[in-house]
Amino acid sequence: MENNTNSTVFDKINYSIKNSVSIKLLSIGFLIAILLIPNSMIKSLISEREFRQEEAIREISNSWASPQQITGPILTIPFESILVLDDGKEISTIKYAHFLPEKLEVVGDINPKSRKRGIYEVALYETQLQLEGTFSQPDFSKLIKEDDIILWDMATISIGIPDMRGIQNKIEIQINDTPYLMESGIPKKFALQLAQANENQYSTPRTAEYQSGVSANIEWSEKLKSASFSTQLSLHGTQSLKFNPIGKSTVTKLNSPWPHPSFEGQFLPDNHEVTESGFNAEWSIFDLNRNYPQQWVGSEHRIADSEFGVKLFQPVDNYQQNTRSAKYAVLILFLTFITFFFIEILNKKRIHPIHYILVGLTLTIFYTLLLSISEHLNFSAAYWISSLVIIAMISLYSMSILKSKKLAGILFMFFSIIYTFVFVVLKLEDYALLFGSVGLLIVLGICMYLSRNIDWYNIKAKGGLNHAATEA
C-alpha cells in the first residue's frame, strides 16, 4: 500500500514537470542555480593555478634577481651640528646632507631571458647600463647653521640597487679623472634616514630599496665647482627595470629585442618605438616634474614616488582570460536551457531534467578543459579546441534525445554562434560592453519573436505542451 502511495506521488511530480510550463521553468531555474556551484569551484581552481604561477615567479626571482629599481648616484656629505643648551653645554651631532646630480643620463640595453618552473615561464633579463652626469658644487647655505662644520673628507657617493644578487660586475665610478671602486652596502646612518621619510605615511617604506646598494668614499673639495661622473652597471633582474629621476635633468634611453614592453611608473616615455623585433624608448624628466628638491638633510623627502621604467610584459595572460571566460557561464547556461525549453514548446519534444543536468555539466566542463589546455597552448587555440569538443558532444547528444538531425544541426549552429560571440567579447576590451549588450538584445528579440503566438495561460488547459507546440 505504501509503495503504491509513493509511486502515485512520484507520478504526479513527474507529470507536473512534464506538462506544467511554470514548474518546467522553475525546475530550469533551479538547475541553473545548482550548476553555478561547480562553476564557482572552477573559478577557485583558476585562482589557485594563478597563485601557483605567481609562486613560480617568486621562486625563480629568488634564484635569479628581483625586479630592479636604480636610484643614484647620490652624493652625501656629513656635517657636525652644534646645539647649545640653556645651561651653556654644547651637544655635537652628525647629520647628513644629500645632493642630487645636476645632469643624469642613463643608456641601457635589456637582453630578455626566460626560465621555466614546471609549466610556468617567467620573463627575466640581463641589462648593461651606462650612467653619466655631473654634480654641481654642494650649496650648504640653506642647510646648515653658521657654527656647523662640514666634513668634506667624509663625502660618500652611493647607488641604490634593491637586489644585490643581480650585480654581475665590479662597479667602478669615475669622478672627474679619479676612479673609485664601489663597495657593497650603503652606510646605514644615512640610508635609514632616506627610508625613514616614508614610515609616517606607508606601512612599508617605499624608499626601503635605497638601504641596499653600493657606495664609495670619495675626495671632495669645497673649492670644487663641479664634477662629472660615469659608471657602468651589469645587472640581472626579473620582469621590470625602473629608475628614479634624481637628476635636475634626467634622460634615460633603453633598447631591447623584447616585442611587448609595458611602460610603467609616474612617467611615460617621450619617444618610443615598438616593433616585432623589439623596442626603444627615451624619457626626459626635469626636477620640476617630481616632488623633492635637489638637496636636503636627513629624512625630509622621499625619493621613490617618481619611479618610471619598463616591464617585460607577457601579452597572453591565460588565467585572466580564463577568469573572464568563466564569468559568462551563467549566460551560456541560461541561453542553452531556454533554447531547449523553446524546442519543447515549439516541436512537441519532451526533455527530461536529467537531460538538462547532463547538458549543463558538459557546459561546465568546458571551463576546466579550457584552463588545462591553455596552460600548454595559447588561449585562442585552447578556446577553439575546447569549444569544438563541447559543441560536438552536445550536438550528438541532442540528436539522440530529440531524434532529429535537423534540430541537432540547429543546436550545432546555435552553440557555434554563442561560443564565437563569447570569444569576440573576450578579445574586445574597449568595446566588449557595447558588443555584449547588442548581442544580448538580439537574443532577447529572438526569444520574443519565437514566443509571440504562444498563449501561455492556455497551454495546460488545451492539452499540455504538445498542444502549445501545435498552436505555435
Image (spheres, rainbow, N blue to C red):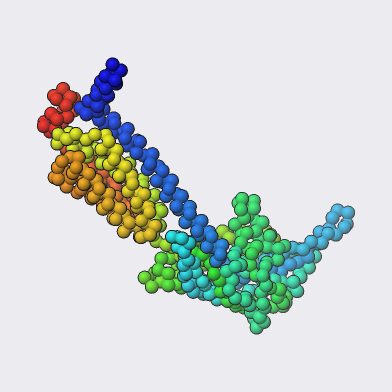
**On screen, residue 395 above or below 245:** above
Q: Residue at x 54, y 69 (%)?
A: 236
Q: Position of residue 182 (x, y in %)?
A: 66, 74
Q: Is residue 460 left or right of residue 150?
A: left
Quadrant occupied by the N terminus: top left
Q: Position of residue 344 (x, y in %)?
A: 18, 35
State how many labels appear. Answer: 0
**On screen, residue 386 above or below 340:** below
Q: Position of residue 458 (x, y in %)?
A: 16, 24
Q: Residue at x 26, y 22 (%)?
A: 7
Query: Along the line of sight, which residue is nearer the eye, 67 or 291?
Result: 67
Q: Position of residue 196 (x, y in %)?
A: 66, 56
Res 431 seen here: no
- Indicate the quadrant where residue 450 lies: top left
Quadrant occupied by the C terminus: top left
- Indicate the quadrant where residue 316 lies: bottom left
Task: Give the residue furthest to the top.
Answer: 1
**On screen, residue 362 above or below 18:** below
Res 171 seen here: yes
Query: Along the line of sight, which residue is nearer the eye, 253 or 235?
Result: 235
Query: Along the line of sight, which residue is nearer the eye, 240 or 123?
Result: 123
Q: Residue at x 19, y 34 (%)?
A: 350
Q: Is residue 459 left or right of residue 58?
A: left
Task: Give the residue furthest to the left.
Answer: 470
Q: Residue at x 28, y 55 (%)?
A: 384
